[in-house]
Amino acid sequence: PRPPYPLRLDGKVVKGFGRGSSELGIPTANIPLSGLSVGGHEDVDSGVYYGWAGLSPSKATHQHPPQTQNAKYSHLSSPLQETLSSLATEDGTSEKGAVYPMCMSIGWNPFYKNTVRSVEVHIMHHFETDFYGSHMNLSILGFIRPELDYVSKEKLIEDIKTDIEVSGRSLAREPYARLRRDPYLLEFE
Ligand code: ADP
Ligand code: MG
């Protein structure tokens, strides 16, 4: 069944297999599988979603290199690049943490022989350092597509770039943009 939105998940950013950055050029912050069961969302569909991610203050502040911020998204259309920079600068970074636009996948991990799923979040923002150990609160606002099998890495990367574009456009719309201020996103223990 499709979840009612927003769908909330949270967890500590942990080490994955390091494939995101090295193989795809698109880092994904992994949170433990228990993040899913804690939220009581075991039945959520596998696939790609978009929403907002709140990061705990430890590492989330101090990262606004103004020029390089969206260098990674130079392949995207220029209206979208503008959208992404406006989303990135209105993040309300404070002592409480910061909220960023994100695109994420919930999927079966073949390594675990399909018994558990993983949650991987690409934050649409340029970070100077990694942020393993930070706490991440996710407010998932919409579903983009189901999980697919790929014949090539290039096809996969192409689809991820489309997912990022769709996420950015959706989050820029007022009903979604407004939800960036959801207090849940910056509630850390
Ligand atoms: P892993 O397999 O350990 O998840 P990745 O290659 O997917 O490794 O890289 C993810 C890590 O990179 C995150 O845990 C985070 O610390 C860091 N990182 C840096 N920039 C981003 C970003 N824009 N989105 C997600 N993670 C990022
Ligand atoms: Mg990852």
Image: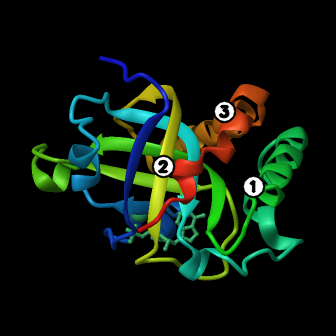
Horizontal side of residue 3 vs 176, given as left or right: left
Hey, what amino acid is under mark 2?
Leu
Give the residue drawn at x 82%, y 41%.
80
Q: Which residue is mark 2?
A: 138
Q: CA distance from mark 2 to mark 3?
A: 18 Å
Residue 43 badge: none
Residue 132 or residue 184, whichever sits in front: 184
Q: CA distance from mark 3 to mark 1?
A: 13 Å
- Dot 3, crowdedness within 10 Å: few (<14), some or many (≥20)? some
Mark 2: secondary structure = strand
Q: Is residue 15 above or below residue 102?
A: below
Image location of residue 146, percent across then percent down: 39, 27
Q: Residue 73 shows which numbered tag?
A: 1
Residue at image point 72% right, 81% down: 62
Q: Is residue 171 visible?
A: no
Give the amino acid at mark 1: Tyr
Callout 3: SS: helix
| Residue at mark 3: C-beta within 8 A of ligand 1 | no
Which of marks 1 and 2 precedes in the sequence?
A: 1
User: How many discs appear?
Assistant: 3
Most foreground residue, 103 or 147 = 103
Query: Of discs 2 and 1, which sits in the foreground?
Result: 2
> In this view, which residue lies farthest toward the top?
1
Compared to 82, does 179 lie above or below?
A: above
The amino acid marked with disc number 3 is Val
The crowding category of the residue bearing disc 2, from other C-alpha atoms within 10 Å (few below 14, some 14 to 19, many at least 20), is many
Q: Residue at x 17, y 56 (%)?
A: 111
Disc 3 designates what residue? Answer: 166
